[in-house]
Amino acid sequence: MATSVDKTLAEQGVQSAEQVAAFFEELRARFDTEVLAIQDEASWEAVRHAWQGRKSGIFVLITDNWLKKANAELKAVVGQGFNALRKYVDGRLAQLESEVKAGTEAWENVKDRVDLSLPGVVRPLGSRHLIRQVFQEIEDIFFSIGFSVVEGPEIETPYYNFEALNIPEHHPVRDDMDTFYMDLPKGSPGQLLLRTHTSPMQIRTMEKQKPPVRVIVPGRVYRRDNPDATHSFAFHQVEGLAVDTDITFCDFTGTIEYFVKQFFGANVKTRFRPSYFPFTEPSVEFDVSCVFCGGSGTTASGTCGKCKGAGWIELFGAGMVDPAVYGFVGYDPKKVSGFAFGIGIDRLAMLKYGIDDIQAFFQNDVRFLKQFP
Amino acid sequence: MKVVYNWLKEFVDVTASAEEIAARIALSGTNIGGVEKGVLGGVVDAEVTSNRPDCLSVYGIAREVSAIYKTPLKPIVPKPVESTTAKASDAVRVAIESPELCARYTARVIRGVKIQPSPAWLRERLEAAGVTSISNVVDVTNYVMLELGNPMHAFDLGKVRDKSIVVRRAKPGEKMQTLDGTERVMDPGMPLVCDGDGARAIGSGVMGGASTEISFSTKDILLECAYFDPISIRRAARSMKLHTEASTRFGRGVDPEMAEVASRRAAELILQLAGGELLSGVVDVYPGKRAAKKITVTRAEILRVMGADVPDKEVERVLSALGFAPVRVDQNRGQEGALLAAWECTQPSWRAEVEREIDLIEEIARVYGLDKFPARLPVARTGAARLPQYEAETRLRERLMGLGYREIVTIPHVDAQRDELFRAANVTPAKLANPLSEEAGVLRSTGSVTVAAAIEWNLNHGQRNVKLFEIGRRYALNGAEAVETPVLAIGATGEVRPQGLHDGARDYSFADLKGDLDAIGTLSGGIGWQDGGPEWLNAAKRGRIFLKENELGAAGMLAKRVAEKYKFRQDVFLAEIALGPFYCAYYGVKNARRYEPLPRFPAVERDFSLLLADGVKFADVTKTIQSLGIVEISSIEAADLFRGKNVPAGKYSLMIRVIFQSREATFSDAQIAEYSGKIVAALEKNLGAALRAN
Ligand SMILES: [Zn+2]
């Protein structure tokens, strides 16, 4: 039951000095709470009146109901407590009065008011490159389902870039991956090239480690294509590889679908189409429902330009690791199975953010960089 | 491969439209480039992957359609009327000198043909498929190639010397005038089809020769349909830059068994369109006939790879429809769904690339439907690890961003001359053997060269206040080995702070660069500075950066000589440090970091205004004070520096702030006065410093 100043202490069952002290403690807390509501002179006056008011202020009531009617044993204690409370309240009210008055004066003086439409102090801010942001997002998604991150050299040997991935010399796929070669000193033992995909790290990883393997490989890759709005001779990929004794095609599609829903949102639909890559079998191309037209193929202005009306957008190639690849790394293809995929980062970022020129990533115009803080 | 719908329908009874068919086969392995509506029921552009030469024909696509729509594929049985008197083998001789290049060569002879333009139906189909009509006989050879996948060639028999064909390897430097009228040097090692005198080439697997070309005066023709080795054809097509419909098909591998049927089909059409008499029989030299391969596929393996079952009936249906003739060979034959089920299949001649069990599994899965295998997320059995430098790099990037730098990503291909501006003399650049252009001829030897290019881009596009960084790699060669080094490159120019409400404008200066580098240096225990640096930095405004005794890189203002190359009209500042040792130190420092209890007694500050001779460094001041061995000195800071006004020439005024901190007691005034006296005396004695009255 709350302390009342309208009743005597005896009526409230107070018999000991401890109880008296507790009552005054409670009043002080009540004052502290009321003080929080003070914003201007009017609210200050309201609080002052409630406590110091001459007719029915709390102090008057304490004097009348508690002090005067206290029994002899408690009278001194009540007197002490009352004095302490009054000193505290008077002091705080006086302090608040000057604060309230000063504040009111500042507000009245228009020139002292802050103009909230003006900027504060502008500190220079940096930003992370969009390609890096997308890398990070993809790494985080795969890391959360147990994929480690590894990286490897961009200047590779033909063995890792082609042969060990089941792409022998004169394989037609080599025609599609026009390759940069390094100009090595005369008499060098072999060739070096700029990797055309991040897949060489599949081989390097499996050479180093026995199953289970779960890695992703973010990195830059190169193809000798003339640059235009959709082609850059350097671009970025995240390779993925999972190999274990029990990895199946169902695990593969499940992993990819998980990634896509995390990256594009839960409403995106996915689809796998059979395709061909020398280092996976079965191989697939992976499509997502078009994020621009919601998969309908049409927008308000007609046929969707992003998916050309198909409702699907081709995202990347993937598949179950071809057993021939295991032969190059000393895995037993009868005992292990796995999947691999290669996600094009630049394309993914272009799709997600509606960027129509891949060159914008590499020009690094600060007006571009600023858009992705 | 453009597939004409009406043509396709001759081989498979489907009611689905061209678009519907395109949508379905797209989901079973034939990528679709588009569908052209209207013409001949529609034309489907099939983008056939390089492992499926069988689909480079209308008949091959029809086989796919038949498997998907569960409709039978009609057999090809051409029955041209043959002469009862003359035999082909009497009219022409064929010899294969290089059986490794030519596994089969068939020749038919038709006499008395009338070369004339093709009828409309033939022209229309060819044109819809993207092939130009020439004359009836040539058109038929193209038509049959599109229909059945086997390229063929018709020679003017009258121009074939000795009526004799020899297939042999091209000799180095051997020339031939091809059908397109140009004289070409043949790729040595490619198959060449020669006539009697053995020297004059009449054709190759890539393109026919001009000397035996069909003309309107041609009467007798020799119809060739052969099988050439794919690798040698591909190599030849690439080296001669001659990619034709024929070279594409031969290069991927045609069906050798189909060669004779295709030849017969062509003869049938030629008789129909050009008349003449087909000599009986065929000259068929077939040194490379292969026995049909047997491949077994088991349910256990289907389950192990695909993770879900396929019913027996579907396995058998799909494999049969594709021509694999599956036969159950396991102990549980007849038992449906047996776990141990095994099917022995026969490789059809048109699917040479299907050799293994996994190849058959792919066939089953793609036609059965990939969507029938339910997706599931596999559980990880081990923990995952980030890249070793992940945390250090993340902290570095965050700190740089906090300091106001924007991250860039550049392409490392640069102009060799630009690269040289920044390259140390002992570095061999990673030069490309086949660059796209001279401006992209080497991989950057420094991170600075591409950051400078990014600054150049921005200045040229009106962006004058720029602070950039790139975390990337620089490249070099060490003999025949490539060296890739992770580096941080920083570039800045223009105003570090624009004119604003609260502060005035200020240009980026060396002090900004140094302060920012020191700020990121604290991540790795602090960096040190020494005089000097690369030549491309301004000699008065540059420094070498150290991590302990390990040199990390350098920072400074771009030298005028280099800035002029870029036509920079404002000061540009660059820095580059190697990140390997930086990251390494990050973890070392982090692991060694321990809490230091806060002092319980107040610190005391004393300022000293010194007049120093130019050339005396702040480091000389601190060293002199430290040499006094006063343990209570916790820091010595530079608080103000100025020249001119009341400061004589050759001197400068430096105010230093010394902070005294005791862990044992509160300082007395006398103690501080004593220390101050020692400091002033030492500075006066060692550095000739004079104390200025404040
Ligand atoms: Zn769309």
Image (tube, coloured by chain):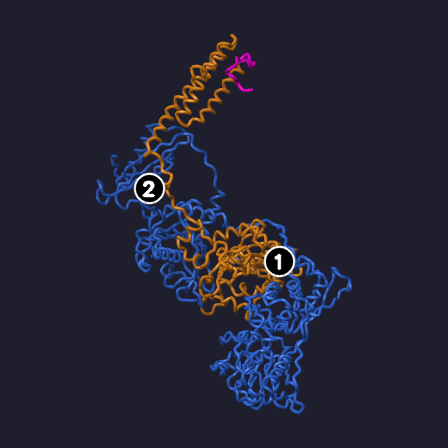
Chain colours: A orange, B blue
Q: What residue is disc 1 on?
A: A338
Q: Is residue B503 visible?
A: yes
Residue B19, image x and y in percent?
58, 66
Question: Type of residue at label 2?
Answer: Leu
Q: Is residue A120 visible?
A: no
Q: Number of numbered discs present?
A: 2
Q: Nearer the viewer, residue A186 or A240?
A: A240
In this rendering, which labeled residue sits more in front, label 1 or label 2? Answer: 2
Q: What residue is disc 2 on?
A: B501
Confirm if mark 1 falls within 8 A of ligand 1: no
Q: Nearer the viewer, residue B560 or A38?
A: A38
Query: Where is residue B114, by image quadrant?
Result: bottom right
Q: Residue furthest top?
A: A72
Magenta residues (range): A1-16
Question: Type of residue at label 1?
Answer: Gly
| Distance of label 1 from label 2 (alpha carbons) | 61 Å
Residue B116's disc is none
Assign the magenta stretch its main secondary structure: loop
Give the class, few, some or many, for how many residues have Cα within 10 Å of label 1's Cα (few <14, many ≥20). Answer: many
Q: Is residue B134 magenta?
A: no
The chain that hosts pointer 1 is: A
